[in-house]
Image (spheres, coloured by chain):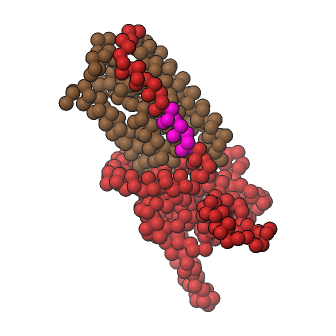
Amino acid sequence: MDPGLLKTWGMRLLFVFLALIIQFFHLLPLNPAPSQWAGPDVLVAIIFAWSVRRPDYVPMLLVALVMLMADMMLQRPPGLWAVLVVCAAEWLKSRERRQRESTFVLEWLTFASTLVVITMIYRAVTMLLMPSPGVLGLSLVQLLMTIAIYPVVVAVSYALLGVRRAAPGDVDRFGKPI
Amino acid sequence: MAKNGTNSEAYTTPLRRLLLAAVILCLLGLFFIWRIDSPRVERFRAAVIDRVLPSFDWAMAPVTATVNLARDFRSYQRIYEQNQELRRELRQMSSWKEAALQLEQENAKLRDLNNVRLDPRLTYITGVVLADSGSPFRQSLLINVGSRDGIVDGWATMDGTGLVGRVSGVGANTSRVIMLTDATSRIPATIQPSGQRALIVGDNSPAPPIDFLENPDQVRPGDRIVTSGDGDVFPPGLLIGQVAQDPGGRLRTRPAADFERLEFLRVLRDHGARRVSNPSALILPETPPTAAPTTEPDVDATTSEREN
């Protein structure tokens, strides 16, 4: 079997596995009391970080399925956050070629602004369509935490999982430049 | 950009766009279906969770136990202070126990005189907490008893002492409990001893505020709050908690249930509870007042089918 293809599918499996692990830890009934504090949305950070680096590791259908599953498991309105994340990830992927030469700070800013935009759309839609959209402060905390965790996610993906940008000479399995 | 326009790229890009559009349409469609016919999609969600989560269970219980163990271990560091504190509390408790024993004897005598039977309808099923809602925006729990064990939507759940919430969403093996701290929870309550009616309005905080109180002057911090049984939501007389006042002067509930540590929940069987089967049943009467008394039976059947 082609080693490149094997590696791509391995990373896709790893992505699904990571998503399951993250949801598992979200669902642990450690402290059921309400808190004024919200953890970061690590799954979204992973999807965006990988979309910017190696779009082929997070194909669109897989992202849609994983996010829909997360919506179902975490009691969110099904489909809404998933569709926003899919759109944002595809937009980031379309910019991937251009970003290849940019610095990390610029990438972080792009990530932050993308996340702010989809969070705002999400808040607006839930406020229009749902009886109890949830506490605004918690959304803000979660947004800031996710932005703060992004460099960590990038560093771990880079160092431990080997998700790094395609180098100028790299070719995919058809011999095309990536 | 060096794009060597191979044939495959010319085909895959429009195909990918089409796929993206299809995925977006599907997800948005699901969201709007959920918005329009939420009970059906929520049932689907309950079924999905019912299928997925019990397979996580083998890992969830030990990990939760390990994390809790680590937390307990941290509390060993101040074990001496805790010990002193507990001794002090124990001294207080022993005097209370004496009082309680005397009251119990008195109570038994009075009951005997009155020939009272405690409500036999309120039996309970105990379930283990499997998972919480997984997001800080929703306060709910998943327990390991479901329709297989006879759980019905709308039943009250308690921990050992106080009300925790209401069953909402029942799968075959699991059911979801919306806690009274959730932002969608509204519980009709009576405040004793003044007998004031009020609503406990969950707002995603540990101490839900008390709303729609007739006369706040008659209510003081420390009063007991119990369910009132209004609207057949809960059986009357279940302990919710105590009245507390926040620095802003607003009356809030200090729940009797220990929300920090919920491991087991009691689901009270309540056969008098009102069943909400279709979305409009909460507001509209079960059978609409018939303006035209004679309708053909087959027309009736189709409309009721559509409503369900």
Residue A171 placement (x, y as % from top left):
28, 16
**Where does the magenta region start and end?**
B21-31
Q: Which chain is red?
A: B
Residue A22 placement (x, y as % from top left):
39, 40
Residue at horizontal 50 percent and vertical 29 percent from the top: A87
Q: Nearer the viewer, residue B29 or B230?
A: B29
The answer to whether B11 appears left or right of B276 in the picture is: left
- Say above or below: B181 vs B224: above
Q: Nearer the viewer, residue B134 or A73?
A: A73
Q: Which chain is brown?
A: A
Residue A9 placement (x, y as % from top left):
29, 32
Residue A116 placement (x, y as % from top left):
56, 27
Residue at horizontal 76 percent and vertical 62 percent from the top: B218
Magenta span includes A164? no
Rendered image quadrant of residue A135: top right
Q: Quadrant of the C terminus of chain B?
A: bottom right
The answer to whether B76 appears left or right of B36 in the picture is: left
- Say above or below: B82 vs B107: above
Residue at horizontal 51 percent and vertical 47 percent from the top: A75
The answer to whether B59 appears left or right of B283 in the picture is: left
